[in-house]
Image (cartoon, grey):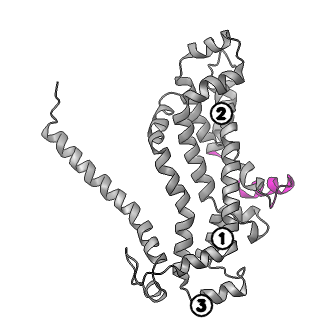
Amino acid sequence: MHYKPTLSRQAFLIINLVVLGGLGIICVLPIIHILAVSFSSNAAATGGLVKFWPVGFNLRSYEYVMSSGRFFNSLGITMQRVLLGGLVNMVLTLITAYPLSKESDRFKPRSLYAWFFFVTILFSGGLIPLFMVVRETGIMGTIWALILPGAVPVFNIILMLNFFRALPREMEEAAFIDGAGHLSTLFRVFVPLALPAIATISLLTIVAHWNSWFDGLIFMNSPDSYPLQSYLQTIVIQQDFSQMTEQELKNMRLISDRTIKSSQIFLGALPVLCLYPFLQKYFVSGITLGSVKE
C-alpha cells in the first residue's frame, strides 16, 4: 500500500530539513573560514579581508608547518595517545561493562560496583589530588599521564552495559553449554554483536583524546612533550612563541601568524574529520541501542 504523507507531515519535513540544514551550515562555515585564511596571503589575512574564499592564494603557511618539527612531534604524541588510550579505554570498558550487565541474582555486588562508578560522574576529587596522584605514581611527563587518569570512562561503560543487557540471555547460556568461559563468551559472542556500540564508543574516545589539551599542560614537564592540542593552545590562545627557534621566528616575519595558526588548526582537525564519516552509520544506532534499558 502506497503511503501518501499528509500536508502537515510534508510541512514538518520541510521545516525539519531547513532547520537542520541551517545548523549544518553554521557548523561548517567556521571550518571553511579557517581553511580560506590558511590559503590566503599575509596582507589579506592580517587585514581581515578573508571570508569564505582564499584571497591571494598561496601555500606558504603549509610549507612553514611542514618544515616545523615541533608540530609533527606533537602530532606524533597525540597519535600515540589516541592509539594507546583508545585501546586501554576499550578493553577496560568491555571487561567492566560485562559483569555489570548481569542481574543482581547472578552477580550480587553488581549494585555496589555500579554506584561506585556512577558516583565518579557526579563528584570529582579535584585537580590538586589528581596532580598529586599522577606525581606520586611516577608517570609525570610520560604518555601514561595522559592515559591512565581517564582509563575507565564511566559514560562509555553505561552505554556498553545497557547494550549487553539488551542481548538475549539464551546466547550466553548456549556459549556456557558449549564450554566457553566468561572471557570467551565476552570476546567471541558479545563483542561481535556489539560492533555498533563499540564503533560509537571508539569515536567518542578518539575525539576525547584528540581534543584534550589541559592535561598536557599540567602533566607534561616540557613543551617538547605536549600533545597536539596543548601545542596549538600555547600558540593560538596564549600566543607563546618563546619555544620557537630563531629560524622559525624569522620565517614568521614573512608569513602572517593568522595563516599559520589557521593551517595548524585545520591540519589538527583533519584526521578526525576524515575518520567520522566511516563511523557515522554506527553512531546513532550505537547510542540508541545502548541507552534504552538500564
The disc, 1 or 2, on the residue closer to the chain's N-terminal end is 1
Label 3, label 1: how far apart the Cα atoms are: 18 Å
Q: In this view, does 24 lie to the left or right of 6?
A: right
| Disc assigned to residue 94 | 2
The quadrant holding residue 60 is bottom right
Q: What is the crowding at mark 1: few (fewer than 14 residues within 10 Å), some, or many (at least 20)?
A: many
Tell me which amino acid carries mark 3: Arg
Label 3, label 2: how far apart the Cα atoms are: 51 Å
Q: Which of 273 and 209 is in front in this view?
A: 273
Q: In the rendered image of this protein, does residue 235 appear above or below residue 156?
A: below
Tell me which amino acid carries mark 1: Phe
What's drawn in magenta, residue-wise? 122-141
Residue at point 64%, 24% (across, down):
188
Label 1, label 2: how far apart the Cα atoms are: 34 Å
Q: Which of 12 and 182 is in front in this view?
A: 182
Residue for badge 1: 71
Q: What is the crowding at mark 2: few (fewer than 14 residues within 10 Å), some, or many (at least 20)?
A: many
Please identify the quadrant where the N terminus is shown.
top left
Q: Is residue 136 left or right of residue 109?
A: right
In the displayed orientation, state which residue is furthest to the left. Answer: 7
Residue at point 66%, 9% (across, down):
177
Q: What element carries label 1?
A: helix
The image position of residue 69, as x and y in percent, is 69, 73
The disc, 3 or 2, on the residue closer to the chain's N-terminal end is 2
The image position of residue 39, as x and y in percent, is 46, 77
Residue for badge 3: 253
Residue 124 in view, yes or no: no
Q: Is mark 3 on a helix, strand or loop?
A: loop
